[in-house]
Amino acid sequence: MMPVITGKLLPLALICGLLSACDNTSSPSDSQRFTTLGAYSGAISQDGSLAVVGAQEEGGSLWNIQRKARLYDWNHASGERSLIAATSFSPDGLFAATATQQDLVLWHTDTGQAEWFWKAPGEILDMALGEQGQYALLGLSNQAAVYFDIINGGIKQTLPHQARVRAVDLSDDAELAITGADDYTTTVWNLATAEPLHTLTLDNVIDVAALSPDGRLAFSASTLDKAIIWDTASGKVLHTLSSSEGLIPKRVSYVAARFSSNGNQLLTGTSSGLIQLWNSQTGQLTKSWRAQKREAYGPNSTSIYDVAFGSNGTYYAMGSNGVLNTLR
């Protein structure tokens, strides 16, 4: 029922104001469109300077975030607009990878040139690129994650699962890997031996899994369920960020996450366009934002493909609507 005062309907603007007063989220300080329509995928470099986008209309492209400039078109065949389903940057930002359901291309971000081209070992659902782009951890639909040698070709390690692997990440030194699968499990692996170190089971499909750069902390979240920060050495859950418990159930799907360079902060994005900054040492929420809508009127929701830390208290979030949000 619409609120009333002295028997009269409240003005629409006042109702909107009352509703927004209950929402503690901030708006982006700036935003820029990277696509004509929406995007199939998107990734931001670790330092927040570059973005690679798989657009519905234009295919793949590399962007300079600060200059708001499109640097290169990155499609997998001349004259075509590839359906880029997964994207990733190497930790140093010198290389990026784009993947369709059939193939994988490694690009040099300085020159924009394709360095290597390989047929994918399966349908790629997620991807994490190692230092200097030599290896990529691929989450596949065929119930495995593979550590793929992009330079020489071939699979260096196979991490077997019981279901589709839709979430993967690497520590910066590539000694540890984390995976999340459709069987509700999330696992930290010794990548040199392909041995699982710890496996946790949540209550739904794992949407996102992330490691801190030094590999000490992990983040895992399942669809409309828990989001946890946990210790990779012990497998112990340190903090639960969301839960369906309580008087008013909170069911949130986290779909993007990244730790700060020192691991003390965690930036997350949800399927409904909510971006949140957490203190990863205490599990406390520091700040929240709502992703920019593409149009002033229309659907509010945009899923967050990737988040990143910039400099001087600046953060970034890439939405499925093809909009990059600058947050402060």
Image: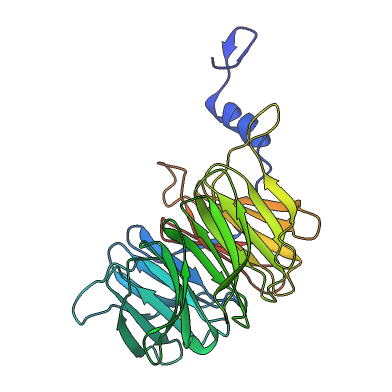
In the rendered image, is residue 328 in sight?
Answer: no
At x 28%, y 77%, the residue is: 75
Report if residue 84 is visible in the image. yes
Residue 239 drawn above or below residue 123:
above
Give the answer, above or below, for where 193 lies relative to 159: below
**On screen, 166 above or below 6?**
below
Q: Position of residue 198 (x, y in %)?
A: 65, 63
Q: Residue at x 45, y 59 (%)?
A: 166
Image x and y of residue 40, in percent: 36, 61
Quarter occupied by the C terminus: bottom right
Residue 187 at x, y percent in the picture: 58, 62
Which residue is most to the right? 282
Pick the front one: 301 or 173: 173
* Quarter holding residue 146: bottom left
Q: From the viewer's perspective, is 148 left or right of 83? A: right
- Of the 4 image quadrants, the one containing the N terminus is top right
Q: How many marks?
A: 0
User: Closest to the observer: 86 or 50?
Assistant: 86
